[in-house]
Amino acid sequence: MAIQKLAIQPGVYREGTAYSAEGRWFDGDKIRFRSGNAEKIGGWQRLSGSSYLGVARVLWNWNALAGTNYLGIGTNLKFYIENGGIYFDITPIRKTVNPMLGPVPPSTGNPFATAYNTLSAGIDATQATLTLTSAASFPSTGGIIKIDSEEIFYNQVSGSDLVGLTRGYNGTTAVAHLTSAAVSCSTIVVTDINNGVTQDDFVTYSGVTGPFGGFTAANLNKEQQVLRYISSSQYAINISGVFSTSAASGGGTVAIAAYQETTGLDIYVVGLGWGAGPWGAGGWGSSATVGIGQQLRLWSADNYGQDLVLAPRGGALFYWEAAAGTAARAQYLSSLASSSTVPGTAYTYQDFVPNATNEISASALQRFVICFGANPYDPTDPDTPFDPMLVRWSDQENPFLWVPDITNQSGEFRLSHGSYIVTSNPTRQENLIWTDSALYSMQYLGAPYVYGFNLLMDNLSIMSPNAAITANNVTYWMGRDKFYSYSGRVETLPCALRQYIFNDLNLDQAFQVFSGSNEAYNEVWWFYCSTGSTVVDKYVIYNYLENLWYYGSLNRTAWLDSPLRDYPMAASYDNRIIYHEVGTDDVSGTFPVPIYAYIQSADFDIGDGDHFAFIWRILPDINFNGSNVDMPSVNMEIKPRRNAGDAYSPADNPIVTSQDNYTSTRSYNIQQFTGQVYTRLRGRQMALRIESSNLGVAWQLGSVRADIKSDGRR
């Protein structure tokens, strides 16, 4: 018998088979490498018990002059400022109607129409159609009703029938209902000409008096979300938790409606128009038959001094003033510009602020606001067509002045390689700009040219507007089919997981890909949607200090490692900000949940596998530093198989347990744990696997040894 050290190279390798990758790690999840040794990643916990609305796609952290720490959060529905664990809604108001206009339902005399009736026939708990005595007053495009204790969503009205039912809506229970049971509706139709809303938009009403149609003024004088777009003059809202108790009736006054910036989708929609199509294939540059509200909502944000500039992709520019406080909403940047007439034109300075951009940024040193994609300046026409290849910037020290003149430094430059600007990334001495086919360098020159542009490389790609990150003065990004780095010159980044990652990536959801750094561990992360998934569910990590790759599964929507916060931050699908690298467990909910972590090697054998091997014991080498429970443990197993093409045979699953008490002491100079575990395993090839799934466990692997002997040829 011979004790053999299982020498396995650090990093995970998936560019070959499990047998050809001998001597490497082949699979894993929730692990990293530090100083060449595999370990479980740190845990995470929610920032606070509060939550926001929508799926967050951007996080931006900065300090105001008074030292207040702000976190900007852009979701597909709103934009928030977080401070002290509270999320403040600063979503801009795009339009205020005072009073609401347009034709009104003849039976009410006001712009709100409600509904109430009874069942003309009983229904069982599964029925998908119900018949009313009369459905005349119910929203024809669908809404939410309540019968007894059950809430039901219906899709549309057909005669006296409500069809396309979703039974047991909002967590209620689907049950049978008798003839003549009351059917109350919480959905009302609002009439307002040229409201410009899309589904899921938000509007705040004020000035409503009542009651009318079973609702009181207090039910309506608040923020409401559009349940369904009906027409340019009508939409439906749902009065959450409140249902009409009478038929539509008159009374009340006309409301003042403040419409917020239109919302966007939380997944990417393939279609035509700016930004549509799988990776822009045939879509960019064609007519915009799909509106910006139907595309994945991405925000860009940057601090201009203590203030914040922000913009939704393809939308208007906004400005939030820190001095106004978290109760103030962001404003259109154009509204803060001078209303004076520009000399030699018929327009004001407000008219010439860019009307849209794909990305906004602020130059911290030179104090410019820069648009990547904008409408060009034309003194005869402020509404020039949007140019997705145009870089346009404000005057220095004046984010509200966008009229180029000999007396200021406002200007613009059109890039030539590519069809649209994907994104930009500021570095120490330059601003990098990616188009869909090239990489440019943008450097400040000073007057009169202001900025200079150099083409760094043509015929390359970037996966999404959020796929680039700068760490340790090197910029890394995910391309369409490989990874890149830039440290003064563009280079392909060798990747031991390239085939595995890019073969398991949903390119229809490429714009959901985002990156982030984890400086404490010398890592850059990319999160992406795996094949068949429309939500982000996978990640890949590059350790730039040790030149290693590893991957795993995790649902996140945005990431930021800010020096102004103690831990890296991420946005989760349950609408919360999560602190990472905290503790050992998942504490994103009410109670801690263990993090399942494992790593598995490629197959190893004796010689070239001409003899079977017999392993009767394993000598582990592991520490449990960072654990917070008594006697933490991992499972350590050897998985045998007869040949490379066979499935793994059943294996023992021995537990390696620490003998130390980590409740009071988190680390020990001399680790004490299970000295050896016994197995009876026989195979031509074998793989080593370590996994943990208990609360409070942290571990780092050392050099595992096994007692192996040759055991014949068959």
Image (spheres, rainbow, N blue to C red):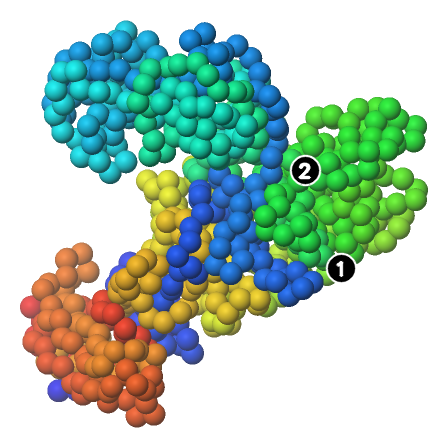
- The residue under label 2 is 332
Q: Inspect this view and state whether residue 603 appears.
A: no
Q: Of the two numbered discs 1 and 2 on the same chain, state the one appearing first in sequence.
A: 2
Instruction: Identify the amino acid type marked 1.
Output: Leu
List x then y, in percent, for residue 666. 33, 84
Residue tagged 1:
365
Q: Position of residue 222 (x, y in %)?
A: 48, 35
Q: Classify 5 as above or below 137.
A: below
Q: Quadrant of the N terminus?
A: bottom left
Q: Identify residue type, mark 2.
A: Tyr
Is residue 321 something one can see in this rendering?
Answer: yes
Give left or right: position of 480 versus 408: left
Q: Nearer the viewer, residue 432 or 405?
A: 405
| Disc 2 element | strand
Tag 1 and tag 2, C-beta contact below 8 Å: no
| Mark 2, other Cα within 10 Å: few <14 / some 14–19 / many ≥20 | many
Q: Secondary structure at mark 1?
A: loop
Q: Quadrant of residue 70?
A: bottom right
Q: Residue at x 77, y 27 (%)?
A: 382
Which residue is pictured at 19% across the width and 28% down the height?
A: 148
Q: Position of residue 605 (x, y in %)?
A: 20, 72
Lateral position of residue 559 relative to residue 470, left or right: left
Q: Quadrant of residue 711?
A: bottom left
* 525, 217: nearer the viewer: 217
Rendered image: mark on residue 405: none
**Where does residue 327 sit, x and y in percent of width and height?**
59, 48
